[in-house]
Image (tube, rainbow, N blue to C red):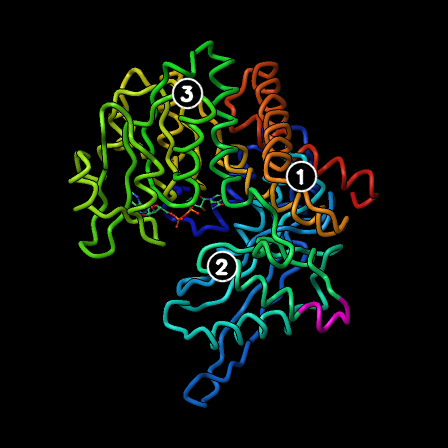
């Protein structure tokens, strides 16, 4: 079936079927894993500022909790559907398993454009979401976190509502909270830094010198900004361009500088949506090119860290022969057609659910610190993140080498294997 005819959940099942077919998992177990364990769909009536009640629709899906409580974000998006949430929940199961953190996979959502709500309406919607599912989530059951359209402040309201209903302060019920109510130091940088930890290990494997290396990045939001900072600070390499989408002219642009970008400076002229100010960048000597220019740069590493479906069968041939590594900071940036081209060209791919697992690893650390009621300093968090993601990377690399597999297939093989093992040990299958 052509992949572009599938919705997100069918695509997640399709990917699972394809990899399961290469393993010895039996068909009954596959059938269990093709569907979520539990899903909740509910209405959330909210008193709006104009005094009227508006009904929103919310979801929480728990795909699998064999290895520990379900874990995954809550998205507030106008086009949210139950199928999108199901797909994202399944992908979270594989992400927590490949990172080897003792959690499962879940996801939640509300059909709403949060930019249309006042602060008070947002708070009432967040509390309403918890009121509907608090019996079915919690530190030992399912731990939500922020995602597209939700923020640390919203997580603070949700944690507060959960705590009130549970009758005691329960910070580990929700992660991604602000620092003042049990958030973890290092969470902001975690995903971008984890991407660079993976790149460092890939370079070691390919015998590339990080200090002489160059990178081009798509995006300049949370993941891209900290990947750009860490690429220079931790590896000594040079990022020659980043790109972003500009909501004003509704176009994307690539911001380049041959001698390397100054990520902290660009951060200072970037808005909350990850759009860089073109006038200020131009004044500072940055060339502003077409949004697709990042992909064709003569660099050693490409870091797609913006959106899904960016490297396709149509544009993969634009990638320069010098590129040795693609580090998938975004979720799903490479289409299956592009994957085939990259494999044939021998480009080393660090698959999304391994490469960007730094965020969920740090969320897990947040819950651990909440449960201990003892908080690590910034360096301790990033050091533990590095250890965890480096170990995960080498686990995948070893399987890829041993079984002569692409990194993505190796990562799926490990993740599915761990989930199946936990289900067997618990006597579920
Ligand atoms: P963000 O909203 O902070 O930033 C997105 C960036 O992409 C912005 O700079 C935006 O301008 C840019 N962008 C959007 N469309 C573009 C286009 N067509 N061309 C170029 N740039 C474009 O998002 P984020 O949190 O950095 O997440 C980026 C990706 O990483 C997403 O796929 C997300 O699911 C994934 N991810 C994020 C985290 C996390 O901790 N933030 C964790 C895991 C995965």
Q: Nearer the viewer, residue 405 or 1?
A: 405
Residue at x 23%, y 32% (from the top left corner): 256
Q: Secondary structure at mark 1?
A: helix
Q: Quadrant of residue 52?
A: bottom left
Q: Is residue 82 above or below residue 330?
A: below
Q: Position of residue 30 (x, y in %)?
A: 65, 41
Q: Nearer the viewer, residue 186 or 165?
A: 186
Side of 223 where 415 appears, left or right: right
Marks 2/1: CA–CA distance: 40 Å
Side of 103 where 296 appears, left or right: left
Judging by the rendered image, the residue that carries numbered circle 2 is 151
Q: Quadrant of residue 391?
A: top right
Mark 2 touching mark 1, by CB under 8 A? no
Q: Is residue 267 above or below residue 84?
A: above
- Single out the mark in the foreground, 3 or 2: 3
Q: Position of residue 295 (x, y in %)?
A: 27, 30
Q: Secondary structure at mark 2?
A: loop
| Residue that lies at the very extreme toward the top in this rendered image | 207
Judging by the rendered image, the residue that carries numbered circle 3 is 236
Q: Quadrant of the C terminus?
A: top right
Residues packed near mark 1 inside 10 Å, few (<14), some (14 to 19) or many (20 plus): few
Q: Based on the picture, tell me whether residue 410 belongs to the magenta stretch.
A: no
* Disc marking residue 27: 1
| Residue that lies at the very extreme toward the bottom in this rendered image | 51
Marks 3/1: CA–CA distance: 48 Å
Residue at x 50%, y 22% (from the top left corner): 406
Q: What span is in magenta?
A: 162-168
Give the main secondary structure of the magenta stretch. Answer: helix
Side of 362 where 321 appears, left or right: left
Q: Based on the picture, tell me whether residue 166 belongs to the magenta stretch.
A: yes
């Amino acid at each position: 079936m052509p992949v572009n005819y599938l919705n997100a959940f069918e695509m997640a099942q399709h990917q699972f079927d394809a990899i399961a077919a290469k393993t010895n998992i039996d068909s009954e177990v596959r059938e269990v894993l093709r569907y979520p364990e539990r899903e909740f769909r509910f209405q959330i009536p909210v008193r709006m500022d104009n005094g009227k009640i508006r009904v929103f629709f919310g979801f929480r899906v728990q795909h699998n909790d064999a290895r520990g409580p379900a874990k995954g974000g809550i998205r507030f998006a106008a086009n949210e559907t139950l199928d999108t949430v199901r797909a994202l929940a399944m992908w979270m199961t594989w992400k927590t398993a490949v990172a080897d953190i003792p959690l499962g996979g879940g996801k939640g959502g509300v059909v709403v454009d949060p930019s249309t709500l006042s602060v008070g309406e947002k708070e009432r919607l967040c509390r309403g979401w918890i009121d509907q599912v608090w019996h079915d989530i919690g530190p030992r059951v399912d731990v939500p976190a922020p995602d597209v359209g939700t923020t640390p402040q919203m997580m603070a309201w949700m944690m507060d509502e959960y705590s009130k209903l549970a009758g005691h302060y329960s910070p580990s019920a929700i992660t991604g909270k602000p620092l003042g109510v049990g958030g973890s130091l290092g969470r902001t940088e975690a995903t971008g830094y984890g991407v660079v930890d993976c790149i460092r290990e890939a370079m070691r494997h390919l015998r590339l010198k990080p200090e002489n290396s160059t990178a081009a990045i798509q995006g300049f939001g949370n993941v891209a900004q900290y990947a750009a900072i860490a690429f220079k600070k931790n590896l000594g390499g040079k990022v020659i361009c980043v790109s972003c989408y500009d909501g004003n002219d509704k176009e994307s642009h690539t911001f380049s500088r041959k001698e390397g970008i100054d990520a902290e400076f660009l951060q200072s002229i970037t808005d909350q949506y990850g759009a860089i100010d073109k006038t200020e960048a131009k004044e500072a000597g940055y060339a502003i090119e077409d949004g697709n220019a990042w992909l064709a740069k003569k660099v050693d590493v490409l870091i797609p860290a913006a959106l899904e479906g960016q490297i396709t069968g149509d544009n993969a041939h634009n990638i320069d022969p010098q590129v040795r590594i693609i580090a998938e900071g975004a979720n799903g940036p490479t289409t299956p057609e592009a994957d085939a081209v990259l494999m044939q060209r021998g480009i080393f791919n660090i698959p999304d659910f391994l490469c960007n697992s730094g965020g969920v690893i740090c969320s897990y650390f947040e819950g651990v610190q909440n449960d201990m009621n003892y908080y690590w300093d910034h360096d301790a968090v990033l050091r533990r993140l590095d250890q965890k993601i480096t170990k995960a990377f080498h686990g995948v690399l070893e399987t890829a080498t041993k079984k002569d597999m692409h990194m993505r297939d190796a990562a799926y093989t490990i993740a599915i294997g761990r989930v199946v093992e936990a289900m067997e040990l618990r006597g579920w299958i």
